Image (cartoon, rainbow, N blue to C red):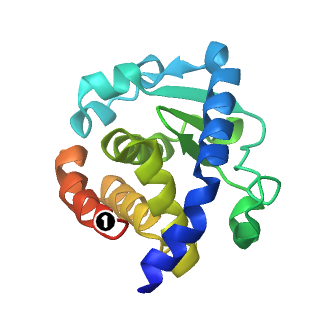
Amino acid sequence: MNENKIIIDTLKPFLPTVKNWIIDYVKEHSLESKTVSEFGFSRLLQYFPKTILDTARVVIIDKVKMIPLSQLGIPWFGDFESMDAIGVTYMNTYFVNKNYVNQESIHFHELVHIVQWYHLGIDAFVLLYGLGLKKHGYQRSPLEFQAYSLQERFETSENNFDVPMQIIPSLDNLVMEIV
């Protein structure tokens, strides 16, 4: 049995609990969320379709809350769980620390995750994210690496690019790792 399959098989029993936590947390903050478009960032439209900016939700928060994985019975991700994160994305909503809300590149990074969530769906996203964390750690996990690499391009390049077109083929390849 290959390593990916062993990790995925270990994570699958926890999937319903993790999904319920995510769904409840997003719902709990839905009334305070705004669309990305409401923030008026000028460059994001050059990288993401308007429909994404009009439907993705943002919650400005004092402290970003990571999924309490150990409380949900998943003890392997303590470093991730205790991170002092600037932002985190759950489904169609991302949460940004109030001190970073005006940094367009943070929104860009989280929007990459929004596209990942849209394309993969909740089950595949959660399993791929968990697999990446377990095998590579946070910074080198494939979904984070993709977001950080594109964020760096956004910050340093004048050339616009279509984010979904950049990432969807590689997401499809990643899905093959969990099937």
Q: Residue furthest right?
A: 71
Q: Residue at x 46, y 84 (%)?
A: 3
Q: Position of residue 133 (x, y in %)?
A: 56, 70
Q: Residue at x 55, y 28 (%)?
A: 58
Q: Is residue 19 left or right of residue 76?
A: left
Q: Is residue 164 above or below residue 69?
A: above
Q: Is residue 29 above or below residue 43?
A: above
Quarter holding the N terminus is bottom left
Q: Is residue 33 visible?
A: yes
Q: Is residue 29 visible?
A: no
Secondary-structure class at tag 1: helix
Q: Quadrant of residue 170?
A: bottom left
Residue for badge 1: 174
Q: Is residue 179 left or right of residue 103?
A: left
Q: Is residue 52 above or below residue 167?
A: above
Q: Position of residue 31 (x, y in %)?
A: 64, 13
Q: Quadrant of residue 157?
A: bottom left
Q: Position of residue 171 (x, y in %)?
A: 28, 58
Q: Is residue 151 left or right of residue 159?
A: right
Quarter holding the C terminus is bottom left
Give the tally of numbered discs.
1
Q: Quadrant of residue 147?
A: bottom left
Q: Is residue 148 above or below residue 76?
A: above
Q: Position of residue 42 (x, y in %)?
A: 33, 29
Q: Residue furthest top?
A: 31
Q: Residues within 10 Å of mark 1 (few under 14, many from 20)?
A: some
Q: Residue at x 33, y 58 (%)?
A: 150
Q: Residue at x 24, y 47 (%)?
A: 163
Q: Amino acid at mark 1?
A: Leu
